[in-house]
Image (cartoon, rainbow, N blue to C red):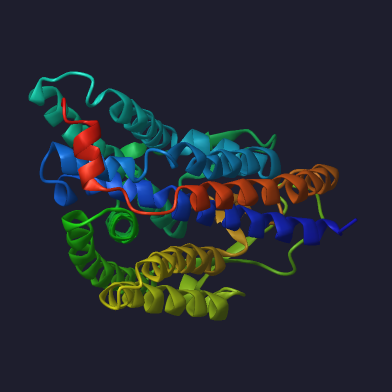
Amino acid sequence: MFEYETLRIIWWLLLGVLLIGFAVMDGFDLGVAALLRVLGHDNDERRALLETIEPVWEGNQVWLILGAGAIFAAWPMLYAAAFSGFYFAMFLILVSLIVRPVGFNIRTKLIDPRWRELWDWILPASGLVPALICGVAFGNLFLGVPLRYDETLRLSYEGGFFGLLRPFPLLTGLVSVAMIVMHGAAWAAVKADGVIAQRAERVLRIASPVFVVLYIVAGIALLGIGSYAISGVADVDGPSNPLRKTVTTAGSWLLEGPLTPWSSVAAAAAIVAALAAPWLTRQRHHASAFVASGVAIAGTITSAGFALFPFLLPSNVEPSNSLTVWDASSSKSTLGLMLLVTAVLLPIVIAYTTWVYRVLRGRVSLEHVKRSHGMY
C-alpha cells in the first residue's frame, strides 16, 4: 500500500486527469452548441451540426460525474467548501447542462419555426454558460475565496455569486470560452460536412489566436497576483485538518510555487498546440487539429493546477484556513480503496469510449440530414 503522502499526490493527479477529461470530452460538444448559429445558417445545417454531438454527449458527461464523485469521495472538505461557496454558479452550470439535452430532443418536435428559433438561441447559451462559469471559478482560485473554519471545523463562506465576478476571474472566463469555442470548431471541422466544416475551419483560425492572446494576458495579469506558501515543513502524512498549518503570502503564483517550472512547460505546450490546430486544418489534417486543441486544453488546466500546488482552494480572508493537498483529503484507507476501484473502472471507461468513437467515425452528411428531416 502506498504511503499517505503518495496517495494524496496520486489523487491530486487523478483529479486533474478527470477535469481534463471533462474539458476535452464534454468541451467540444459545449463548443458546438455555442457555435450553433455561427456554423449553421438554416434548420438543416443546424440539425446536421447537432447530429455530430448527439450520439456522444451523454457518454462525455461520464467525465463530469467521475470528477464530481472523485471530489466528493477523495476531497470531501473541498467538495463541501466549493459546493457551498459556488452554489449558485454550479446551479447555473447544471441548468445549462440539463437544458441542452432537452433542446436536442424537442427542438424539432413542432413545425412552428418560432419554436426552433427559440431553442436555437437557448442551445448556444447552454454551451457558453458552463464554459464561462468554469473559467471564472478557476480565476477565483488564484485570488482566493472568502472561506474560514472555526475551531470545530465548521465552515463559513462570507461571499456571494456576484463577488466571484472580479476582473481577473472574468478574464479567465473569457479564456475558457475562447478555448471551448476553439475545441468545438475543431470537432465540427472533423465531423461536419461541406460548407459547415469550412465555416468551422474559419472559426478555428480566429478562436485559436484569440485564446492564445487571452491566455497570455491572463498569465501576465497573474504575475501581479500574490500567492500563498505553507510556512515551515508541511505535514504531508498528518490528518486532514486545515487549521494545523500556517500560511504566508509569497510572490506570484507563476514564480514561487514548487511546481512553477512545470507550470511554464504546460503553458508553453498549450500555446503551441493551440496555434498548431488551425495550421493543421490548412494541411487537411482535421483529426490532428482536434487532438492539438485537446492538448491545448490539457496544457491550460495542467498549468493552473501546477501553479496552485499544493493549494486546492485558497482563502483570502484567513489564508491559514486554505485547503491544500495535505489537509483536505479523505483518510488513507479511503484513498487506497478508491484507487483500487479506479484502477479497474477507469480503463473500462476509456475502452468503451474509444470503441464508441471508432464505431461513430466519419462525417455527418448534410444531404442525409435533409432526407431524414425533410418534413421539418
Residue 26 placed where, x, y %?
A: 43, 47
Q: Relative to the observer, which residue lies in front, 162 or 104?
A: 104
For the point 15% across and 28% down, the residue is 116
Residue 69 visible: yes
For the point 70% across and 54% down, the residue is 11
Q: Is residue 87 left or right of residue 373?
A: right
Q: Relative to the observer, which residue lies in front, 280 or 276?
A: 280
Residue 157 visible: no
Q: Relative to the observer, which residue lies in front, 303 or 83?
A: 303
Q: Taking 249 as reference, is 124 above or below it?
A: above
Residue 291 placed where, x, y %?
A: 44, 66
Q: Taking 367 as reference, is 108 above or below it?
A: above
Residue 30 placed where, x, y %?
A: 34, 46
For the point 90% across and 55% down, the residue is 1
Residue 142 placed where, x, y %?
A: 45, 60
The quarter of the rendered structure image containing the C terminus is: top left
Q: Is residue 374 left or right of residue 355?
A: left
For the point 35% across and 77% down, the residue is 276
- Outermost residue on the right side: it is 1
